[in-house]
Image (tube, rainbow, N blue to C red):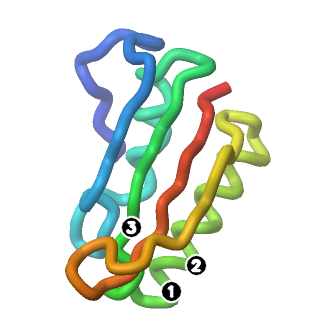
Amino acid sequence: GPNRLDIEDNTYGGAVATGCFLEGHAKQDCFLEIIRVVKPGGVLVFQLNKTGLSKSYLAGFEDTLKAHEDDKLWTLVKKEFVPKLLGNEDGLRYVYRIN
């Protein structure tokens, strides 16, 4: 979120998050911190449980992803539908390269 991690800039070659970005959990404002600590050229992979998200949350989430892409903070490498990501619940997987 809005809190700065006690980690130097450009520390990690990549980051993975699954089960983090849900209503009531980590918010999309965390992405700026993840971008800061991942080295340019590094990869961020995260997954969302699509079933448990409201349309308004998902729309706001997509807006944030697009804004970071428009600001050239990252580049979308892949977005894919994941059937039965968690039990019978479908999900989405995103892969971004940090710029």
Identify residue type, mark 1.
Ser
Q: Residue at x 75, y 40 (%)?
A: 71
Q: CA distance from mark 1 to mark 3?
A: 14 Å
The residue lying toward the viewer, choosing from 49 and 27, is 49
Q: Residue at x 62, y 33 (%)?
A: 97
Given this view, does label 1 or label 3 mark the residue nearer the observer? Answer: 3
Identify residue type, mark 2.
Ala
The residue lying toward the viewer, choosing from 63 and 81, is 81
Up-down relation of residue 6 to residue 25 (above or below): above
Location of mark 2 (residue): 59
Given this view, does label 3 or label 2 mark the residue nearer the observer? Answer: 3
Up-down relation of residue 82 to residue 65 (above or below): below
Judge the density around disc 1: few (<14), some (14-19), many (≥20) Cα neighbours within 10 Å. Answer: few
Up-down relation of residue 30 to residue 62 (above or below): above
Q: CA distance from mark 3 to mark 2?
A: 13 Å
Location of mark 1 (residue): 56
Judge the density around disc 2: few (<14), some (14-19), many (≥20) Cα neighbours within 10 Å. Answer: few
